[in-house]
Image (cartoon, helix red, strand yellow):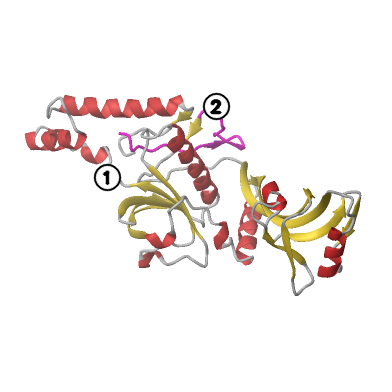
Amino acid sequence: MRGCAARLELQSGAVRWRSGGAPHAVRPPGRSSRLAVSAEVVKTTRKVELLKQFPVELPRPLGIVFAEKKNGDIRVDELVEGGNAATSGKVLQGDRLVKCGLMDALVDCEGLGFDGVLDVLGGSPDSDVMTVVVERMVEEVEEIEEDFSDAAAYWQRKRELKAMGGKRVSDMRRTGGLMPGDIVVDRQIGGGSFGGVFAGSWNGTQVILKRANAQVFGAEELLELEMQLNDVVLAKSPGSCAVYVGCCEVAEVEGRPIYEKKLPEGLWLVWRNDGEKTLQSLMPAPKALSKAHELGALAEALGCSGGSTQLASTQVVVTQLLEGLRDLHAIKIVHRDVKPAN
């Protein structure tokens, strides 16, 4: 069936998922989480904030309104609409002024004061261009390698992140529109040692929710990979697997107990709930299938056009299954756990 599952595989110290050429692995929601972790090193990414300086040459008039703060910093308080600074796109409101003047004779603004800065920027009347060096925090994504060969070091990193207060709410990864307060957790419908699968709703839409077991070695990292792979499937082969809605990461300060039907802390993946029954659950004993009303119900559920026979139902199931696998293979993704239960 199209809402099927696959196993995510790690092997030989590398994740079996690359942007091109080699097969990928993907697993939309299912009733079990049977993942074997054998990798030692997994490449992942993280967001970091860096303080950077940017020299900007601007024609006069600059089109910047500066303001002196209580700590003596000179900040960009406003950009004149249509002015040279605003047009350049290289100066932002809130930037700290570090240096200013002619490019070959920049003056350090530390301790210069507001009037001193104006004197420098107003000097050199023969020059049509002035340079300002501004400073701001920028967010960058860096690639890191997680070493899973040392369990003690792995858990130590987890404890250090916890001690630092965990991630900030502003750092949470959320697909547009997916907010913790809009999601209700109704009940758990499956799971295993690596995580749990839940039925719930999001703004009235029935959804399937999945999160990793943070107490299991490598489980959170595997869920991160599953998120990336579902993003690929959604973008390149929609309809071949369960409909992926997106992710909703919950900060520690936002997390609520699951018995309150809210999302606890952690990364949650969300799929549209198009039915919780698996193909296996629709495969009763042969004697039961011989009953006309049982075959009729199954045929109706599958949308059979060839009548309510066992052969007609089987043809629809196999056709949908092969079409889904064909679409996945077309984008270099291999489904490694095809079975009725998935």
Across and down, in percent, residue 126 comes to 89, 50
Across and down, in percent, residue 279 comes to 26, 37
Judge whether residue 216 is colored magenta.
no
Single out the residue that lies furthest toward the left.
292
Relative to the observer, which residue lies in front, 290 or 62? Answer: 62
Residue 22's tag is 2
Asked if residue 26 can be seen in this view, the reply is no
Residue stretch rendered in magenta on the structure: 1-23
Q: Is residue 137 left or right of residue 335?
A: right
Relative to the observer, which residue lies in front, 118 or 47? Answer: 118
Q: Amino acid at mark 1?
A: Gly
Graded by Cα atoms within 10 Å as few (under 14), some (14 to 19) or many (20 or more), the crowding at tag 2 reads few
Total labels drawn? 2
Q: What separation in Å lies between label 1 and label 2 (alpha carbons)? A: 32 Å
Q: State the image quarter where residue 301 is shown.
A: top left
Relative to the observer, which residue lies in front, 235 or 298? Answer: 235
Residue at x-position 80% and y-position 54%: 133
Asked which secondary structure carries label 2, the reply is loop
Asked if residue 43 can be seen in this view, the reply is yes
Q: Is residue 16 left or right of residue 56?
A: left
Across and down, in percent, residue 92 comes to 68, 55
Residue at x-position 55% and y-position 25%: 21
- Is tag 1's residue or tag 2's residue first in the polypeptide sequence? 2
Residue 186's tag is none
Q: Is residue 253 above or below residue 189?
A: below
Q: Amino acid at mark 2?
A: Ala
Graded by Cα atoms within 10 Å as few (under 14), some (14 to 19) or many (20 or more), the crowding at tag 1 reads few
Residue at x-position 19% and y-position 29%: 313
Asked which secondary structure carries label 1, the reply is loop
Q: Is residue 313 above or below residue 242?
A: above
Tag 1 residue: 275
